[in-house]
Amino acid sequence: MLPPSRHRPLPPLFHFSESPDRQAKGGEEGRRGSKTEPRRGLGRGEAEETPKSQILPPPSCPPVPNQRAVLAAASASSEVRSCRMVLWVFGYGSLIWNPGFDFDDKILGFIKGYKRTFNLACIDHRGTPEHPARTCTLETDEEAICWGIAYCVKGGIDKERKAMQYLERRECEYDQKISVDFFKEGNSLKPVVTDVLVFVSTPDPIGNKYYLGPAPLEDMARQIATANGPNGYNRDYLFSMEKALTSISHEDDAIIELANEVRKVLNRMKEAKITGSDVALKSHVPLVHLSALPEGTVVDSR
């Protein structure tokens, strides 16, 4: 499982809450305001009730003017945004060049502590249950950053629901949804967006049947070069990712290395075809036989 320190549970949308310190302070003030205290000049044991106009409201009901001021300040600030108000989704794979859902805004940036790997099996888009493709997921790495696109959906509950329904069908082979901070270039200390949704895969080959795990570079290249499914060849997915990262000026060295190795495999395949040689590429690929996904799961997307 991903270490708990690297991600946090997704917060509920449209939820406003006060800090524990403010709640504790408000509770103490509320209790002080509701007490009956002795008044000077009264005899021992005599007390006068505090007038209702002096009783502070409970901490769960702050004065309306203050609440309006807080909301106005939050809407005026563009420094930090949060998916508590809208839905934010981080795309680090095919979502970069083909989001496939209706969004209102997007930001180029990065997340910390994660790296791309081609360790996830795909049997519905670029592969089959008999010959799975390798697609991208994220795995923790304290020193790494991962560049991508954060998409904002802010058209209301119905629009967010449609986006999530689409994404959950498309990313059905990812078994986790986590929440991360998103940063822009030039400011790696303060996130520009918090609570950004990310689809990832648990790096556990026993508990997660779609996790293939790492393999030698040449073996991965052979598998990617030959796998194909309803959406086309696995290699085209890899080459599209390489091109997309170049287009945003943030190439991934691991992706470039893997793509170049796949090109070598394809060249050998082409030469073998010309000379009539029999090069059994698939025999070197460790196959993982997986059950087909439910009908209707395939989405023409990645």
Image: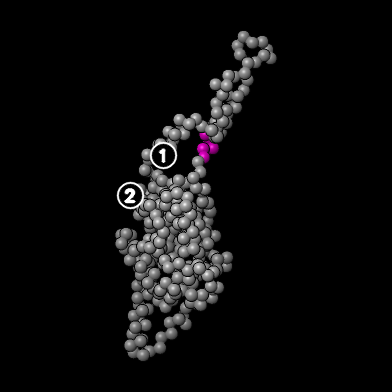
Q: Quadrant of the C terminus?
A: bottom left
What residue range appears in magenta?
17-22
Task: Name which residue type carries label 1.
Answer: Ala
Above or below residue 253? Residue 269 is: below
State the image coordinates of residue 214 (x, y, percent, origin top left): 47, 69
| Residue 97 in the figure: left or right of residue 159 | left
Badge 2 vs badge 1, beta-carbon distance below 8 Å = no
Q: Residue at point 48% right, 71% down?
A: 124
| Residue 242 in the figure: left or right of residue 125 | left
Q: Residue at point 42% right, 66% down?
A: 301
Viewer-nearest residue: 86 or 219: 86
- The residue at which mark 2 appears reads as 186
Q: Check if residue 92 falls in the magenta segment.
A: no
Q: Which mark is residue 74?
A: 1
Viewer-nearest residue: 298 or 108: 298
CA separation in Å, label 2 and label 1 = 23 Å
State the image coordinates of residue 29 (x, y, percent, origin top left): 56, 27
Viewer-nearest residue: 169 or 80: 169
Q: Residue at point 48% right, 31% down?
A: 64
Q: Quadrant of the N terminus?
A: bottom right
- Mark 2: secondary structure: loop
Picture quarter containing residue 59?
top right
Q: Residue at point 43% right, 75% down?
A: 228
State the image coordinates of residue 51 (x, y, percent, origin top left): 58, 19
Mark 2 and mark 1 lie on one chain; the one further toward the N terminus is 1
Task: Name which residue type carries label 2.
Answer: Gly
Q: Which mark is residue 26?
A: none
Residue at the outermost top position: 41
